[in-house]
Amino acid sequence: MFDFLSEYDVLGAFWLTVQLTFFSAIGALIWGTILAGMRVSPVPLMRGFATAYINLMRNTPLTLIILACSLGLNQTLGMTLAGQNFEQQNYRLAILGFIAYTATFVCESIRSGINTVPVGQAEAARALGLGFTQVLGIVVLPQAFRSVIGPLTSVLIALTKNTTIASTIGVAEASLLMSEMIENESDKIFLVFAIFALGFVILTLPTGLILGWVAKKAAVKR
Amino acid sequence: MSTATSAPPMIKASGVNKYFGDLHVLKEIDFEVPRGQVVVVLGPSGSGKSTLCRAINRLEPINSGEIQVDGKPLPAEGKALAALRADVGMVFQQFNLFAHKTILDNVTLAPQKVRKVSSGDARKTAMELLERVGIADQAQKYPAQLSGGQQQRAAIARALAMRPKVMLFDEPTSALDPEMVQEVLDTMTSLADEGMTMLVVTHEMGFARRAAHRVVFMSDGEIVEDSTPSDFFTAPKSERAKDFLGKILTH
Ligand SMILES: Nc1ncnc2c1ncn2[C@@H]1O[C@H](COP(=O)(O)OP(=O)(O)OP(=O)(O)O)[C@@H](O)[C@H]1O
Ligand SMILES: [Mg+2]
C-alpha cells in the first residue's frame, strides 16, 4: 500500500518545511523583539513606525505578502538575497516574508508579556542608573519572555503550518509535494492527506510539549 | 553650618510644583537636605510624600521649580539623568528586587552595567554589603524565596552597592509584617550612624525620634512644619500637625 512513497522524497520535503520554520522563527523572534522594544520606547517616531508596521502586516493575508516578496521584491525590484538560482531566491524570499509577518505576532505576545512585569521592576532599574535599553534588555524583556513562552509556542506552531504558503511561489516544502502526489495518486488521496497531516503533527506536537515544559520551568516567581 | 558656602546641600528643592492633571500634588516646595543629615518626612496619606521623594531622582518629573542634587540641577533625561540616578540610592515600599535574578545578582547588576566594575569586584562588594545587612547566607536565593524583611534589606544592599551620595526611602517598612519592621529599621539606623545622607518617608515615629536630625511634616502638598524631632513631637505648631499626631498617638 505504501509502495508508491518510494517514488517521492517526503522526508526531503518535510526537511525543507523544518528549515523554513527554523530560520523564519529565529528571524521573527529577533525582529519581533525589536518591534516590541520600539512600541514601548520613549521616542514617538519609533512607536509610530512599529504601530503602523504591525497594523499593516498583521492585517494583510500571508499569501499576499509571500507573493509580494516574490513578484514585487524579486521580479520587479531585482532583490535576490544573494540566492544563486530561482529556487534558492524564492526560498530566501519566502523566509523574509514569514519573518515580516510572524514578527508582528511575536511582538504582540512580547508586549503582553511586558505588561505582566510590575512597573516597580523598571522603576528600580531606572533608579539605579540603567538606561532605557538596559532596563528593557536586562530587567523587563527577560521577565516578559518567560511569561509568554505559551503564546509564543502558538505563534511557532502557526508558523510551521503557515510555511505551506511558500508553495505558492514554488518552494518545494511539504505541501507542494502533497499537491503533486494528489494529482499523481488520485486513488490514494486520503492516504496522502493522512501522511502529510501526520507529518505536521509530528513536527508541532513535540514543540508544544517541550515548550510547555520550558514555560513551567522558566516562570518567574513573585 | 560652617561649610555652607563651600559645600552645597545634598538636596535642594526650590519652588517645586507638581500636578497630576488638575490635582496640585506639590505646592511651592522649598526644602533642603544638608550633607550627613537624616530627614524624615511625615504626613497623612495623599499629602505628596512619595511624589516628593520620587521627584528627587526624576522618576516623577515636576512642572515648575528646581531640584538640585549635590549642587547640580536635575538633568532632563538621557545619560546625564542616568548618571545622577546612579548617585542617588532609592528604596521602595514594595522592595522591587529583580524577580528573575538571585539576590547576589540583584546587588552586582548595576555596579557592573552602570559603573563598569569588574564582576569579581562587584561580587566582593556585594557579599560585604549582604554580610552587613545580615543576609549573606541568602545570596544565591531568588527574591520570592526570602521574607519581606530580608528582601527589603537586600534592596538596601542593592542601592548601597552603587556607593550613592544620598539615600531615599519611601515607606520602606510599610509593606512588612510587624515582626520584620525592626530588622529593616536597624539597618537604616546603622546607615544613619555612619553619616549617610538620608531622606526617609515613614510612619515609624520611633525611627523619626531616634535617627532623624529633622522632621518635615507635609499636608495637602505643602510643607507645613520643618523642625527637630523633639520640637515636632512635643510642641507641634500647626493645627494640621497636632491633628496628625493626635491620630497617630491614639492608635
Ligand atoms: N501617578 C499618579 N497619577 C495621578 N495621581 C497620582 C499619581 N500618583 C499619586 N497621585 C495622587 O497624588 C497625591 C499625592 O500622592 P503621594 O503618593 O505622593 O502621597 P503620599 O503622601 O505618598 O501618600 P501615602 O502615605 O498614601 O503613600 C494623591 O492624591 C494621589 O492620589
Ligand atoms: Mg506614598
Image (tube, coloured by chain):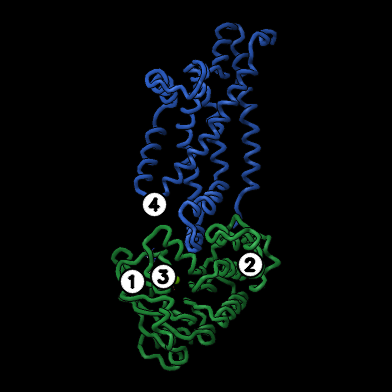
Chain colours: A blue, B green
Q: Nearer the viewer, mark 1 or mark 4?
A: 1
What residue sits right under mark 1 in the picture?
A: B66
Question: What is the chain identity of the residue bearing mark 3?
Answer: B
What residue sits right under mark 2 in the picture?
A: B125
Task: Identify the secondary structure beneath mark 3.
Answer: helix
* Residue B113 position by quadrant: bottom right
Task: Identify the secondary structure beneath mark 2.
Answer: helix
What residue sits right under mark 3 in the picture?
A: B56
Q: Report whether mark 2 lies on the same chain as mark 4.
A: no
Of the image marks 1 and 3, the number of the one nearer the N terminus: 3
* Residue A42's disc number: 4
- The type of residue carrying mark 1 is Glu
How far apart marks 2 and 4 lie (CA) works out to 34 Å
Q: Nearer the viewer, mark 2 or mark 4?
A: 2
Task: Identify the secondary structure beneath mark 4.
Answer: loop
Q: Residue at x 54, y 26 (%)?
A: A161
Task: Identify the secondary structure beneath mark 1.
Answer: strand
* Residue B14 position by quadrant: bottom left
